[in-house]
Amino acid sequence: MGINLLLLDVDGTLTVNRGELALEPEAIRAIQRARGRVRIGLVTGNALIVAEALAKYIGLNDAPIIAENGCIIKVNSSTIMLSALSARSIAEELIKRLGLKPTYQYPCRYLDMTLDVNGDDYNVVNRIREELIKMRVNESYAVETSGYAVHIRPIECSKATAIRRLCELINVDCSTVAFIGDSDIDAEAFKVVGLGVAVGNATGRAKEHAKLVTRNPSGKGVAEFIELMLSGGINTLT
């Protein structure tokens, strides 16, 4: 069974490296070569408005988009919120309690809230989780790091859940989907698609759950996979 839908993470995956924001030109050129041969979508922790703008700039005007780490789906001009719960009030309380700072995208986010990290992001994640226990809301919110920011989101939302919902909406079998990512947040989503692909510099957890790991890092790894796909090197998903 071939690939009917190619989903791409953004930060750390389409960029020149993890922790950097500049897009990798090789990845963008590969996407433009592939867009007429396979449907392509974005699955990102970025705010919807950022993901929509990025999609337009790289030539994916009508691409399905999963934003805010699975909290929002944009498909066929419809925007779907996958939870009635927002993490904004919790994030604002954490900012006060722990002295954290919101990211530049914070004002335009709906459900998944992002906090800047200086230093050890896993340490910040653990501090937030401890604080959520004290606030007695730890069973309602998930906390993870993307390597760019710490994300706090409704616990029922995830990239995996959103990918399954997207596949239902566009009538695509999840087993015919390939998803490329780089972070711990992407690892769970690899389990629900036919082919989970980790770029060469992905986290250990992402690589552990991926079926394929590219030789090259980040955006160059995306280009590597797309060229392999277009050349017939990946004909079936098993």
Image (spheres, rainbow, N blue to C red):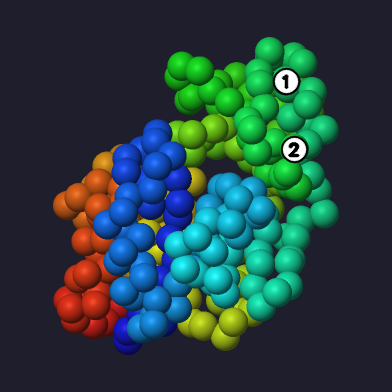
Q: Can residue 83 be seen in the rendering of this structure?
A: yes
Q: Looking at this view, is 171 or 118 the one in front? A: 118
- Quadrant housing the N terminus: bottom left
- Quadrant housing the C terminus: bottom left
Q: Looking at this view, is 170 or 137 the one in front? A: 170
Amino acid type at image mark 2:
Pro
Which quadrant holds residue 167? Answer: bottom right
The residue at 31%/64% (across/down) is 29
Instruction: In the rendered structure, find residue 107 and report the number of the disc placed on it.
Output: 2
Q: Looking at this view, is 105 or 178 the one in front? A: 105
Callout 1: few (<14), some (14-19), or many (20+) C-alpha neighbours within 10 Å?
some
Residue 92, given in percent of the width and then of the height, sits at 78, 26
Compare marks 2 and 1 and give the one earlier in the sequence: 1
Residue 142, given in percent of the width and then of the height, sits at 64, 40
- Callout count: 2
Residue 48, given in percent of the width and then of the height, sits at 65, 54
Q: Is residue 54 above or below residue 100?
A: below
Q: Is residue 126 above or below residue 167?
A: above
Q: Is residue 209 left or right of residue 137?
A: left
Q: Looking at this view, is 225 or 212 the one in front? A: 225
Judged from the image, the secondary structure of the residue bearing numbered disc 2 is: helix
Q: Which residue is mark 1?
A: 95
In front: label 2 or label 1: 2
**Contact (CB < 8 A) between labels 2 and 1?**
no
The residue at 57%/85% (across/down) is 171
Amino acid type at image mark 1:
Ile
Q: Is residue 73 left or right of residue 3?
A: right
Judged from the image, the secondary structure of the residue bearing numbered disc 1 is: helix
Q: Is residue 32 above or below residue 155?
A: below
Callout 2: few (<14), some (14-19), or many (20+) C-alpha neighbours within 10 Å?
few
Residue 106, given in percent of the width and then of the height, sits at 70, 36
